[in-house]
């Protein structure tokens, strides 16, 4: 059988080398995987940036960014009457004042553009060529000799707005990714002009300064619109490295950088060669320091009080909490028209520096506290360990040395707070303890004229020469006032008044005068008792008026609303000043306004608050009204003049020498010399001065009885008034119609007749004159020991 032949095969291809086949397949696989990974990375990157920038709406809202700027405090220059910048209310990390792009010189705009981003007007928010080059240099191959910046103005603005500034490693790459995405969105959403305006107002300079308007004011004391070419280039130079190009500490570095910017502007055709050479030849001349402008980051005591006052009023106006109100003030760009007198404030601050204890002695003593701060003067044992004590409950008490402190505040008679200092020495912190504004103290005898005496005259109960007995209102045998020292020593404190009647020695006469005496039982005219601050005389006037009437007047009419409506309605509190909490120096000074013309105005630290567009946002809610008749006010003014000008006054001879102008005043001492006061008025100003320890302490234990005197407060006031009134024209207190001068009999206190052997002159309301004296002066008509001569207490504080 014949064999069948097979069909012919196609010739086989010659197989390639197996290694090459493997490499080829691997490369193809890697390319595919790379494409897939790149796609996933791109999707992941898009997802990432969308997620992390989801809340960028508020951060990158350039329509509202203008609202985030510092608030300015302006004051009236007392010499020119012009409004000047006094301070800036800003948070700790920024100081910004907004300027519209139209205000900013073209030269300043291009000083930034030519150096930072010359393609600003043509690029889409990102310079991809520079960005790729910078990334290769950073992460792959160092193709440049130094680190390259690729940020456009949009990207720099984003850094300013978001504080997203991490710059190295993986986080730096992610930050750059976020920044690029944001810049593209920003460029698509806003015009170049809007972006440039926002950038120029958020760029950072030295310290806490932000924005070109603030920089222009800080470095050249100019509005940004007034800057010259070389000043524009100087400001633009600082932002590259605010430390290295600080105009105050590195002026030569700044000049080199400035001239480099000017060269760039010339090369890019923004300025001419002549402009470049002329500007580059200019020396760096910075603005001289302006004493009226607070360049220090530490705010004054006045600014601190103003801040608190405005925050409180914003809270009431907007119905927001304190934190929100503070944020509004820090970032709202408000202009606050303050009442401060910059010259007077500076003079008061210099005095209260108290160099070498020139005015207020230190009086150091140890005090126990449960914690020690950096500002405390801690006490150490001989071996160098902190001095401590452990209480029975395990509490550790540390010892610190403390000194006397003081406060001073001055107002005019329209309630404007002109100056305020709340502590001695240099102020080192903003919003620190302000003893002039926020701390209450017992008033001592300073309450006597604004309560008992003023109302006694107003109600027609007493007059200038009303004779009052210099003796206690209550005697020991009356069993009205407890002797608390006796009761404490003998374990009688828990007894009721009825039970205590069985102990005659558990009672005492009341009140005592300063120094512990009970008076000499003589009859004295009212003016004398007030000038000498005799408690025995003041209590009798207060008893006639009534403690509740006095409280209602000082609490409601004079707005001393830190007094206690339950515990302070008594003669001891309302006449001798031993209140539960007391009042602040600012409130007490305001109360003494009434001795000018009888009018009271709520003390205030600002008149208006304007928004960033110049519209009135808020006005001070102070009120003015007649607290006393002008007649009573003038009689009281004359009575209080005796405190300074009479030989028996508690501040005798310590009036300011101010072009012959008069003054009035009242000293005050709280129990055990824990608080010492003086409130003084001139035709221009009324001032309260307080001196004591932060934690009340008997000052005679550290200073001695001859040092711990109200004369310290008086002399500080006198020194300040002589300085600030030196160049003021003569002014007199307003005399009131209806007040007359009359001679009175020094024995009876009645209007003098021809038979009166001794007379003096007093001031009286014409509608409330005393009767004419018809006594037979051959006998002691009023007292068995009439006052024929007044004791000289010039060198004593008899408060």
Image (cartoon, rainbow, N blue to C red):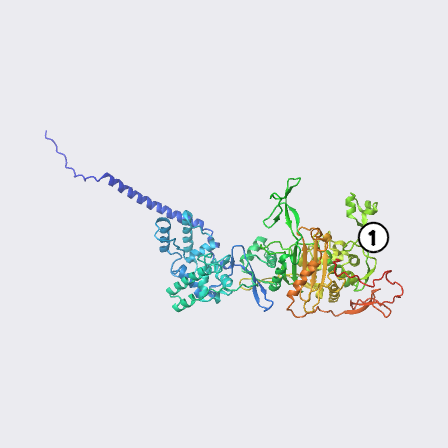
In the picture, residue 771 is in which quadrant?
A: bottom right
Residue, far left: 2
- Mark 1 packing: few (<14 Cα in 10 Å), some, or many (20+)? some
In the picture, residue 434 is in which quadrant?
A: bottom right
Relative image position of residue 570 (x, y in whole percent)? 76, 54
Relative to the observer, which residue lies in front, 310 or 205?
205
Q: In this picture, is 296 found above or below 397?
A: below
| Circle 1 SS class | loop
Relative to the observer, which residue lies in front, 565 or 669?
669
- Quadrant of the rendering where the C terminus is positioned: bottom right
Q: Dot 1 corresponds to which residue?
A: 475
Q: Name the residue: 83% across, 57% down.
A: 521
Residue 233 at least partly seen: yes
**Total label count?**
1
In the picture, residue 569 is in which quadrant?
A: bottom right
Relative image position of residue 584 (x, y in whole percent)? 67, 56
Residue 461 at least partly seen: no
Q: In this picture, is 371 found above or below 738?
A: above
Residue, far front: 382
- Tell whether 512 sits left or right of 186: right
Residue, far top: 1
- Tell whether 205 sits left or right of 617: left
Relative image position of residue 517 (x, y in whole percent)? 79, 54
- Quadrant of the rendering where the N terminus is positioned: top left
Relative image position of residue 481 (x, y in whole percent)? 80, 50
Relative to the observer, which residue lies in front, 184 or 660?
660
């Amino acid at each position: 059988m014949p064999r069948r032949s097979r069909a012919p095969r196609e010739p086989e291809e010659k197989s390639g080398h197996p290694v090459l086949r493997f490499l080829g397949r691997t490369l193809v696989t890697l390319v595919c995987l790379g494409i897939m990974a790149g796609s996933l990375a791109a999707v992941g990157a898009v997802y990432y940036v969308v997620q992390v920038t989801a809340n960028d709406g508020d951060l990158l809202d350039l329509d509202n960014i203008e609202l985030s700027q510092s608030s300015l405090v302006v004051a009236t220059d007392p010499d020119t009457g012009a409004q000047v910048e006094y301070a800036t209310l800003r948070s700790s990390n920024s100081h910004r004042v907004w300027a519209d792009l139209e205000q900013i010189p073209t030269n300043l705009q291009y000083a930034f553009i030519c150096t930072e981003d010359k393609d600003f007007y043509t690029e889409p928010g990102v310079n991809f060529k520079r960005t790729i080059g910078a990334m290769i240099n950073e992460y792959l191959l160092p193709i440049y000799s130094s680190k390259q910046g690729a940020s456009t103005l949009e990207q720099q603005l984003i850094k300013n707005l978001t504080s997203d500034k991490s710059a190295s490693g993986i986080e730096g790459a992610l930050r750059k990714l976020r920044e690029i995405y944001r810049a593209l969105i920003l460029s698509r959403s806003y015009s170049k002009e809007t972006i440039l305006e926002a950038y120029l107002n958020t760029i950072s300079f030295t310290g806490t300064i932000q924005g070109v308007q603030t920089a222009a004011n800080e470095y050249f004391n100019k509005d940004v619109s007034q800057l010259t070419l070389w000043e524009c280039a100087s400001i633009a130079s600082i932002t590259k490295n605010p430390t290295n190009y600080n105009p105050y500490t590195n002026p030569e570095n700044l000049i080199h950088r400035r001239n480099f910017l000017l060269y760039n502007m010339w090369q890019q055709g923004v300025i001419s060669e002549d402009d470049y050479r002329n500007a580059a030849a200019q020396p760096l001349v910075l603005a001289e320091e302006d004493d009226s402008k607070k360049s220090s980051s530490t705010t004054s005591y006045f600014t601190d009080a103003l801040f608190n006052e405005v925050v409180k009023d914003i809270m009431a106006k907007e119905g927001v909490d304190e934190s929100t109100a503070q944020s509004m003030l820090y970032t709202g760009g408000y202009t606050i028209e303050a009442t401060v007198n910059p010259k007077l404030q500076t003079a008061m601050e210099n005095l209260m520096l108290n160099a070498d204890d020139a005015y207020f002695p230190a009086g150091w003593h140890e005090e126990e506290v449960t914690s020690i701060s950096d500002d405390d003067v801690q006490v150490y044992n001989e071996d160098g360990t902190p001095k401590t004590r452990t209480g029975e409950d395990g509490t550790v008490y540390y010892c610190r040395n403390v000194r006397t402190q003081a406060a001073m505040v001055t107002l005019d008679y329209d309630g404007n707070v002109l100056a305020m200092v709340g502590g001695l020495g240099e102020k080192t912190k903003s919003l620190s303890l302000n003893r002039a504004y926020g701390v209450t103290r017992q008033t001592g005898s300073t309450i006597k004229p604004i309560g008992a005496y003023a109302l006694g005259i107003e109600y027609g109960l007493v007059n200038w020469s009303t004779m009052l007995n210099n003796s206690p209102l209550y005697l020991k045998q009356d069993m009205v006032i407890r002797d608390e020292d006796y009761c404490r020593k003998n374990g009688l404190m828990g007894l009721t008044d009825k039970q205590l009647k069985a102990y005659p020695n558990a009672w005492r006469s009341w009140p005592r005068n300063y120094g512990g005496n009970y008076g000499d039982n003589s009859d004295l005219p009212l003016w004398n008792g007030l000038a000498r601050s005799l408690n025995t005389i003041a209590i009798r006037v207060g008893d006639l008026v009534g403690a509740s009437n006095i409280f209602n007047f000082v609490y409601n009419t004079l707005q001393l609303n830190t007094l206690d409506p339950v515990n302070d309605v008594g003669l001891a509190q309302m006449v001798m000043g031993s209140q539960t909490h007391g009042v602040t120096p600012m409130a007490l000074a305001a109360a003494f306004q009434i001795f000018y013309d009888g009018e009271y105005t709520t003390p205030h630290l600002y008149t208006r608050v304007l928004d960033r567009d110049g519209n009135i946002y808020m006005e001070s809610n102070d009120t003015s009204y007649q607290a006393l008749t002008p007649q009573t006010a003038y009689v009281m003014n004359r009575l209080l003049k005796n405190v300074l000008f009479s030989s028996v006054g508690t501040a005798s001879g310590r009036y300011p020498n101010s072009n012959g102008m008069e003054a009035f005043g009242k000293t005050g001492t709280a129990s055990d010399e824990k608080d010492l006061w003086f409130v003084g008025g001139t035709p221009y100003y009324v001032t309260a001065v307080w001196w004591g320890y932060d934690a009340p302490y008997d000052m005679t234990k550290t200073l001695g009885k001859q040092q711990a005197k109200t004369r310290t407060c008086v002399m500080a006031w006198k020194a300040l008034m002589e300085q600030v009134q030196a160049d003021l024209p003569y002014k007199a207190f307003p005399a009131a119609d209806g007040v007359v001068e009359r001679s009175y009999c020094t024995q009876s206190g009645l209007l003098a007749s021809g038979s009166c052997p001794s007379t003096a002159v007093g001031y009286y309301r014409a509608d409330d004159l005393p009767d004419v004296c018809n006594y037979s002066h051959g006998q002691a008509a009023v007292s068995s020991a009439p006052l024929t001569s007044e004791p000289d207490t010039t060198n004593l504080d008899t408060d």
